[in-house]
Image (cartoon, helix red, strand yellow):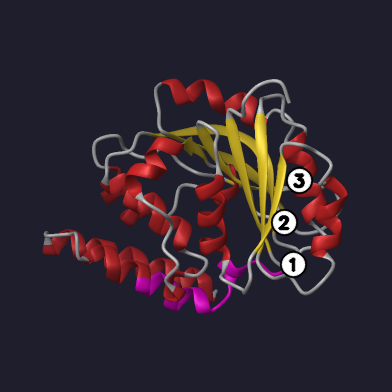
Amino acid sequence: MKNEPLVSVIIPAYNCEKYIGKAVESALEQDVPLEVLIIDDCSADGTEKEIKRYLDIPYLHYYKNEKNLGAAASRNRGVKYAVGKYVAFLDSDDWWTCNKLEACIPFLTNYDLIYTDMFIRYNAENHGLKTLRGYQVNKRDPYKEMLLRGNPCVNSSVVCRKSVIEKIGYLSADVNLIAVEDFDYWLRMAWAKVRFKHIKKCLGYYWLGNGNLSFNKKQVNRMEALYEKHLMNIQSSKLKQEIIAHLCYRQARIFQ
């Protein structure tokens, strides 16, 4: 690659031999200078074999954890090795449209974190796609709005400045926050007044066909742990009640 990578694409991988190729290839299709960092979290299936098909690509890097650490710690390892000005997160069972990064990067002139809508895929067919939509957070108080409205950012849609990550720190590897560590991270960024920008376009595909962690009953306990952590920052008792009411609503929807 002639140019230094502008974007570092971080893909944590665990037992994803059926999907990892599509994720990697969608990153390689992007028409911007990039590097791809794949962090294999001790997969026990054919994930490593699938990844090795791409190892002749000079800007694709493969790292394997010595033991299973979880997605958050794997992403953190990728961030540690990243050299791009921007960092893009991509889960191993999701994939992007070919213009994903090209559409996001221009907005990083005036914003710190860009996120988009994504199509939801339940099966391998192309018809009947549903949409996972975000929302533009309030510039004045994004932290409060996220606690009241929920997570606006799909992890695999996010591109952000690496300098922001260096300021905020790494994702939490707290086991109580598994599958909500991304929301915790966006809340931490919102607390630090990071500038968010939502692009109202579907620039990727969010795979639910394999039983996504974000939609099981354990998620109720994870959400409680997340909100318990962040409610400590809220001084107004009235606002706390409103936030707790939103949490109860979210939990009811998960059970439903």
Residue at the image position 59 percent from the left and 38 percent from the top: 8
Numbered label attached to residue 210: 1
SS at badge 2: loop
Identify the magenta region.
Answer: 211-225
Residue 66 lies in quadrant: bottom right
- Is residue 95 at all visible to an observer of this figure? no
What amino acid is at disc 1? Asn
| Magenta-drawn stretch, dominant element (helix, strand or loop) | helix
Numbered label attached to residue 179: none
SS at badge 3: helix
Residue at the image position 36 percent from the left and 67 percent from the top: 226
Position in image of residue 147 (x %, y %): 32, 56
Position in image of residue 36 (x %, y %): 68, 42
Q: Which residue is mark 3?
A: 24
- Dot 1 or dot 3: first in sequence order is 3
Q: Nearer the viewer, residue 183 or 255?
A: 183
What amino acid is at disc 3? Val
What amino acid is at disc 2? Asp
Q: Residues within 10 Å of mark 3 (few under 14, many from 20)?
A: many
Q: Which residue is mark 2?
A: 93
The Cα–Cα distance between marks 2 and 3, rounded to whole angstroms, is 10 Å
> Which of the two discs, 1 and 3, sits closer to the camera?
3
- Dot 2 or dot 1: first in sequence order is 2
Q: Is residue 95 left or right of residue 132?
A: right
Q: Nearer the viewer, residue 63 or 236?
A: 63
Q: Is residue 178 left or right of residue 131?
A: left
The Cα–Cα distance between marks 1 and 3, rounded to whole angstroms, is 18 Å
Q: Nearer the viewer, residue 41 or 222?
A: 41
- Is residue 125 at all visible to an observer of this figure? yes
Position in image of residue 228 (x %, y %): 29, 71
Residue 35 lies in quadrant: top right
**CB under 8 Å between discs 2 and 1:** yes
